[in-house]
Amino acid sequence: MVSSPDGLVEEMLGGIGDAIGERIEHKWWSKYLYPVFVLAVLSIPVVYYFW
């Protein structure tokens, strides 16, 4: 069990990534759409900060 907040967030994001990967890894579109989705989600805080 990880007690630090950083460790908890890292575990949570790793679990979410693994779950999403298991669900879409065999679909043909996942190779193209998944990186775009990740970039879009990660850019939301940057856009919000500079808006």
Image (tube, rainbow, N blue to C red):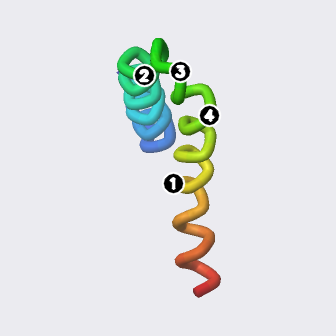
Residue type marked 2? Ile
Give the mark nearer the N terminus: 1 vs 4: 4
- Cα distance between the residues tagged 1 and 4: 15 Å
| Figure disc tally | 4
| Camera-nearest residue between 35 and 18 | 35
Could you tell whether 12 is left or right of 7 in the image?
left
- Cα distance between the residues tagged 4 and 3: 8 Å
| Mark 1 surroundings: few (<14), some (14-19) or many (≥20) residues within 10 A | few
Residue 1 in the image: above or below residue 4: above
Give the mark nearer the N terminus: 3 vs 1: 3
Answer with the quarter of the image where residue 23 lies.
Answer: top left
Residue 41, numbered circle: 1
Residue 28, numbered circle: 3
Give the mark nearer the N terminus: 2 vs 1: 2
Q: Where is residue 14 in the image (x, y as percent from the top left)?
A: 47, 27
Secondary structure beneath dot 3 equals loop
Residue at 50% from the left image edge and 41% from the top image edge: 6
Residue type marked 3? Trp
Could you tell whether 45 is left or right of 22 in the image?
right
Q: Which of marks 3 and 1 is in front?
A: 3
| Mark 2 surroundings: few (<14), some (14-19) or many (≥20) residues within 10 A | few
